[in-house]
Amino acid sequence: MPFSLLKYGLNKDYPFEQNADLPSPSALKSHYDVVIIGAGGHGVATAYYLAKYHGITNVAVLEKGYLGGGNTARNTAVIRSNYLTSEGVKFYSESVKLFQGLSNEFDFNIMYSSRGQLTLAHTDAAIRGFRQRTEVNKHFGGKTELIDPQQIRELVPSLNMNPADQPVLAGLWHIDGATARHDAVAWGYAKGATQRGVELHQLTEVTGVDVDKGKVTGVQTNRGKISCGCVVQAVAGHSSIVGAMAGIRMPITTYPLQAMVTQPVKPFLNPLVSSPALHCYVQQTGRGELVFGGGSDPYPLYNTRSTMDLKESLLAHAVELFPFMANMRLMRQWAGLTDMTSDYSPVMGLSPVENYYLDAGWGTWGFKATPICGKTMAELVATGKVPELIKPFSMSRFDTFRQVNEMGATAASH
Amino acid sequence: MKIINCPLNGPRNSSEFVHGGEVRQMPDPNNCTDKEWADYVFYSDNLIGVVTEWWLHAPSGYWFIAERHTGSDEILRTYDPAEIYTSRVEFKAKEEPSASEEKTA
C-alpha cells in the first residue's frame, strides 16, 4: 500500500475535493435559461452539447436520484444502427459515429468495444427482413451484411445452430455493433458539462411544472421553485408522469424489462448475439460476465420487481443458444422501466407546451441513441428549430398516422 | 401478482391471462376527428395508480375487467364486463362504397 494512501486515511477531510470529476453540489439558483429534467445519459449529453457547441451554460440538470442511476444504469449497453426505416438508420448511425469518438473527446475511457452484432434468422420471413435491413443500412453507409450458417459458425463457434428446434438459417451481421460501459457514458458527459459551467443537482426531484398561457415558465422541486426559459424532459421510464405535470398526454405505455448477468468466465464470445425468434440476446462483457436481455414484460407496470416466469423463459432460450451456459451461475438480475411507443421509435422534439421539449418514448432503445439525442436536443433548444434528423420522431406523427415502424428491428422484444 | 382471480374460472396462474389494455370509451369512428381517433388508439394517461383494464383468460377465451394498481402490481377487483356494459357495443364502421358504385358515381 502506498504511504500516501495512509495519509489520506488519517486525514479528516475528503482529500480529492479539488480533483473531483464533479463539483460539489451548490445552492439552486432562482433562474436558469435551460432546465433539464433527468440526469441520465440523455439529459447530461444534452447539457454537454448545449455548453460545448452553443455556449449555453446557465443550465441546471435536475435529478431525483443520482447521476445515471435510472435506466442508464439498467440497460444492457448495446450500440447498433441496423434498423429498418431510413429515418431510424440515419439517426442511429450518427449515434454510433459519435460513440466511437467519445473516449477521446471526454479524455475518459467509456470502454467502447466494437465487437459486431449478430442477429439470427430462424425463418425465411426473418431472412427477407434482414435483406431489407442490409440494403437500407448499406445505403446510409453502415456496415451490415447477410451471412450464412458457415460464417456464423466461424464467428461464434460456441453457438448451437439448432436452438429449440429452430435451425439458424442466416444472420444479420452488423459490423458496427458495439458495447460500452453505460455508467461511464453518463459520467463522461456530466464531467464535460459541469466543467463548462453546467450545474448538476442530484437528489432534486421535480414535483411540478409551471405553464402560463401555453408556455413553460418554471419548475417546482423538492428544493424550491425555479424559473426558466425552457425545459427539456429526459426521464426514461417516467415520461408520462413528468409529461402530465406539464399537462401533456403521451402515446406511451410503460412496461418493465428484465435482464440478468452471470458469473465471469474466460472470454469466448466476441460479437453480441441476438435471436428475435427466441426473444433473447446475449453478450459477454469486458469483465467476462454474460449479460442477457429479452422482451418486455407482458403487461404495463411501474415496478422493477422480477418475475420467475420471464426469467425462466429467458434463461431457457439462452441455454438453447449456448447449452454449456446451463452450468453457469447467475450473479444479478434486475428490471428497468421502458416507455414503449406503438411504433418502437422515440418521441422527440416539440411538445404542445411552448419551450417544453420532449426526449421521451425511449423504450428499449435509449442507450444507443445517447450521443445523438444530446446533440440534436441541444440544437433544438439553442436554435428553436427541430433538426432534420429528429423531425420524423415528433409526437405529432401519431396524430397524422405517420409512424416510423421499427418493431421489426428490435433485437429481442417482439 | 402471481394469481389472478378470474370472475368465471376462479383464481388461476397469471400466465394464463393476457392483458388487453385500458377500458375506455371508443369515439364514434364515423364522426370523430383524426386527433380524437389517434388519441383513442395511441395515447394514454399511463399513470401510476389504479387502472381499469381488459384481461383475457386465454384457455377459456373469456374477457373480463380488472382494477389493478400499476405501481404495486396488485389486482384489487375483477368482474364480468356485464357490470359496465349493459347494452351491445357496435363496432361497425361506415360502409365503404363498393367498387361498382364508385364506377357509376
Image (cartoon, helix red, strand yellow):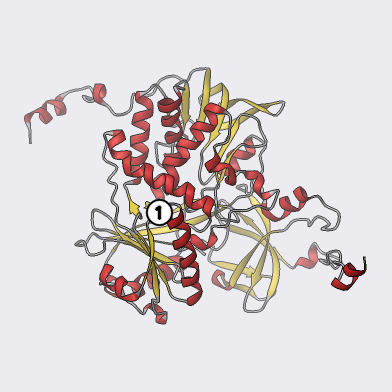
Image position of A156 (left or right of B51): left
- From this viewpoint, is residue A378 visible? yes
Image position of A136 (left or right of A150): right
- The residue shown at (61%, 39%) is A243
Whether A237 is drawn above or below A85: the answer is: above
- Density class for disc 1 (Cα within 10 Å; few <14, some 14-19, many ≥20) is many
Q: Position of residue A110 (x, y in %)?
A: 29, 42
Q: Circle 1 marks a residue in which chain?
A: A
Looking at the rendered structure, the number of numbered marks drawn on it comes to 1
Q: Position of residue A398 (x, y in %)?
A: 66, 50
Q: Quadrant of the N terminus of chain A?
A: top left
A147, A223: nearer the viewer: A147
Q: Position of residue A395 (x, y in %)?
A: 63, 44
Q: Which residue is mark 1?
A: A142
- The residue shown at (31%, 71%) is A152
Secondary structure of the residue carrying numbered label 1: loop
Going by the picture, which residue comes out furthest to the bottom? Answer: A165
A272, A383: nearer the viewer: A383
Whether A111 is drawn above or below A256: the answer is: above
- From this viewpoint, is residue A296 visible? no
Q: Position of residue A237 (x, y in %)?
A: 52, 47
- The residue shown at (84%, 57%) is B28
